[in-house]
Image (tube, helix red, strand yellow):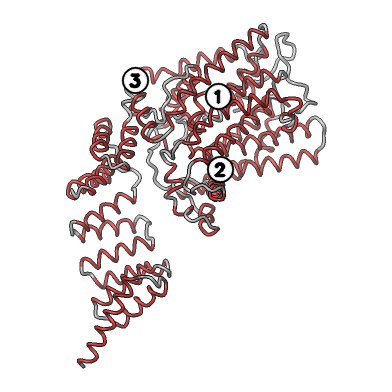
């Protein structure tokens, strides 16, 4: 980053230099949202994107939305005990407690507004509003560098309306990214405000106050989505550009921001364990990085063929001759930028921010989705601020006729809006989403599998099996299609074929997915292969999955196998983990009954009934064992 700082060093004697804004000026957010001053600009920045995106109001939950919001046990129901889980532990590989807490609030608000808590409508509206707020933050920050507010507006509209942003806005799950951006850029705003008071007005008290505000907002951003960590780069880069702060002072000022980053990294790594991805060798990561950068530049400049997953993995890239030479093009672009660094410093600044905006999800560092694709539209959301700055600076620094500039920009923005208008319906539901993915990237096994999941949910088994098979033809090591095929085969009572596919799923699974073992154990029970089912449950427990539910399942399987003593031991552990597990008490009662320990069985049934007075099976079992005990006593 030191070299990047030097990149901005301005030659004060250069006649071509476009100097920074007067440092006594600081454009506040309050000034930006002043309707009397910026009414027309606010109309374009708020109303236009709202009209463009409001169509998603009636769109369904897609992709991971179900896992985050519908089947998420800690959001059903919403209460403090459940919400505390998100603050104590990683959920589904992510530590984003602020996002989950606000999702819970949106669910409850949806209910208060008379909607079903599982309705996607309010979630979509919130995403749209957040995107608009983020646009206002982008405009505010652009105004710290761009004198002409209309040019800053054009750059912001490019950020708001470009079709590459659709995934982030239309996909409910990316609320986390929108929220992180919102908090992150509010933090960046406060950081720059702190710099303004520190270096220009010398109001250290105010400077320190805004600095603390920025730090707190940055922590909220990290707890919304950790990829906003790139603010660690943005803040010192912008401070250096505006105030030429020494590197030593920059490090001291940014150091407190590093502390929460380290804490969250430790939490995430310790909780995630194995991931679906394996790290790329160090030597190949720069090539992946350069390919990702060029891919995003292409998608921004040529707005066509967008998809939810591009399947741009190493398996796809390593066979392409251009993959290992793509860095040459980047090198050429870098050389051009370096040549004009003094004449167009803001364009250089925007380029650097664009690069740093995707540095955590570009292939240099491992990330989970890398197993499916090195690139995704949502990963460029933050970097689009750099593009907005480049565009605004280009318009301001070029000596074009303003009428022609606004005419060309208007036509271009209308064109982008039309492309977005046509692209948005792709996110209507899983069928449209993954059918589009197959159409745009037919070699992507991920899209075929996900469309198969949609068909499975609709009970269109033949279509689902066809898609799963196609997915496996494209990638025979992909574990999920095997698992999904097994689910259908189980529905069709083809248990042997299901077990074969589950074996394949487990063989190729890099993540030791517990669901695979659980489903195979359940299938073994259906085929009365109890010992194999027991082995699967024991393996799950050895993998750290010793939950009350799992011990209860293990106990039940031992019960079916006639291993009553082992069953009791498993139920004991299940009850130890959850004293309110009525099912474990009932099942242990059955085990005690088979061991002819009727007094213990009666106590277990009574406890199960105490926990659930309407537990009919326990009530019936209690009557039977009580009568059985009485008969034995009478015979004596």
Q: Look at the picture and state if 417 lies above or below 535.
A: above
Q: Which residue is mark 3?
A: 320
Tell me the crowding category of disc 2: few under 14, some 14 to 19, or many 20 or more residues within 10 angstroms, Cα based.
many
Q: Look at the picture and state if 461 lies above or below 374.
A: below
Q: Residue at x 28, y 52 (%)?
A: 519
Q: Residue at x 42, y 67 (%)?
A: 578
Asked if residue 184 lies left or right of residue 463, the reply is right
x and y percentages locating residue 228 in the rendered image: 56, 37
Pointer 1 and pointer 3: residues touching (CB < 8 Å)?
no
Which of the two marks, 2 or 3, is nearer to us in this view?
A: 2
Could you give the CA–CA distance between mark 2 and mark 1, rounded to whole angstroms? Answer: 24 Å
Q: Which residue is mark 2?
A: 224
Of residues 538 and 628, the one nearer the viewer is 628
Q: Secondary structure at mark 2?
A: loop
**Total number of numbered discs in the rendering:** 3
Q: Which residue is mark 1?
A: 161
Closer to the N terminus: mark 1 or mark 3? 1
Q: Judge whether residue 599 can be spotted in this image.
A: yes
Tell me the crowding category of disc 3: few under 14, some 14 to 19, or many 20 or more residues within 10 angstroms, Cα based.
few
Quadrant position of residue 161: top right
Pointer 2 and pointer 3: residues touching (CB < 8 Å)?
no
Which of the two marks, 2 or 1, is nearer to us in this view?
A: 1
């Amino acid at each position: 980053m030191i070299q990047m700082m030097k990149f901005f060093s301005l030659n004060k004697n250069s006649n071509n230099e476009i100097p920074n804004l007067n440092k006594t000026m600081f454009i506040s957010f309050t000034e930006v949202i002043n309707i009397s001053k910026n009414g027309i600009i606010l109309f374009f920045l708020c109303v236009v994107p709202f009209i463009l995106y409001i169509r998603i109001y009636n769109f369904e939950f897609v992709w991971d939305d179900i896992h985050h919001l519908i089947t998420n046990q800690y959001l059903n129901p919403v209460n403090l005990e459940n919400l505390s889980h998100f603050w104590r532990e990683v959920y589904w590989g992510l530590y984003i407690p602020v996002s989950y807490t606000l999702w819970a609030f949106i669910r409850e608000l949806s209910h208060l507004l008379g909607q079903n808590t599982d309705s996607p409508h309010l979630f979509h509206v919130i995403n749209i509003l957040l995107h608009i707020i983020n646009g206002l933050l982008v405009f505010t920050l652009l105004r710290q560098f761009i004198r002409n507010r209309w040019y800053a507006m054009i750059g912001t509209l490019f950020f708001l309306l470009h079709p590459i942003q659709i995934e982030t806005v239309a996909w409910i799950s990316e609320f986390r990214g929108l929220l992180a951006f919102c908090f992150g850029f509010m933090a960046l705003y406060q950081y720059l405000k702190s710099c303004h008071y520190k270096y220009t007005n010398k109001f250290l008290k105010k400077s320190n106050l805004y600095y603390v505000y920025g730090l707190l907002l940055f922590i909220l951003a990290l707890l919304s989505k950790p990829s906003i960590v790139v603010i660690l780069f943005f803040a010192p880069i912008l401070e250096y550009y505006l105030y030429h702060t020494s590197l030593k002072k920059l490090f001291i000022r940014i150091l407190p921001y590093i502390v929460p980053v380290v804490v969250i990294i430790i939490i995430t790594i310790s909780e995630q364990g194995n991931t679906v991805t394996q790290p790329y060798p160090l030597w190949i990561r720069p090539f992946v990085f350069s390919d990702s950068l060029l891919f995003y530049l292409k998608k921004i400049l040529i707005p066509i063929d967008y998809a939810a997953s591009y399947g741009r993995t190493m398996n796809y890239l390593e066979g392409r001759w251009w993959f290992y030479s793509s860095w040459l093009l980047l090198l050429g672009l870098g050389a051009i930028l370096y040549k004009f660094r003094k004449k167009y410093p803001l364009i250089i600044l925007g380029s650097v921010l664009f690069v740093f905006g995707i540095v955590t999800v570009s292939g240099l560092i491992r990330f989970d989705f890398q197993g499916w694709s090195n690139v995704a539209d949502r990963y460029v959301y933050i970097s689009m601020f750099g593009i907005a700055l480049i565009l605004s600076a280009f318009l301001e620094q070029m000596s074009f006729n303003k009428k022609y500039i606004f005419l060309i920009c208007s036509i271009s923005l209308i064109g982008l809006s039309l492309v977005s208008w046509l692209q948005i319906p792709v996110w209507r539901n899983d069928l449209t989403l993954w059918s589009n993915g197959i159409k745009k990237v037919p070699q992507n096994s991920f899209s075929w599998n996900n469309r198969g999941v949609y068909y499975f949910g609709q009970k269109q088994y033949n279509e689902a099996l066809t898609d799963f098979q196609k997915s496996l033809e494209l990638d025979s090591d992909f574990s999920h299609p095997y698992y999904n095929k097994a689910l259908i085969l189980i529905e069709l009572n083809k248990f042997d074929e299901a077990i074969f596919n589950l074996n394949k799923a487990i063989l190729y699974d890099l993540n030791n997915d517990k669901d695979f073992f659980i489903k195979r154990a359940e299938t073994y029970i259906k085929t009365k292969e109890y010992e194999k089912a027991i082995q699967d449950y024991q393996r799950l427990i050895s993998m750290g999955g010793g939950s009350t539910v799992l011990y209860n399942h293990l106990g039940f399987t031992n019960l079916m196998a006639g291993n009553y003593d082992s069953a009791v031991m498993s139920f004991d552990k299940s009850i130890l983990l959850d004293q309110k597990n009525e099912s474990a008490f009932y099942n242990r009662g059955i085990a005690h009954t088979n061991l002819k320990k009727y007094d213990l069985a009666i106590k277990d049934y009574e406890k199960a009934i105490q926990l659930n007075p309407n537990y009919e099976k326990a009530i019936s079992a209690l009557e039977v064992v009580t009568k059985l005990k009485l008969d034995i006593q009478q015979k004596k």
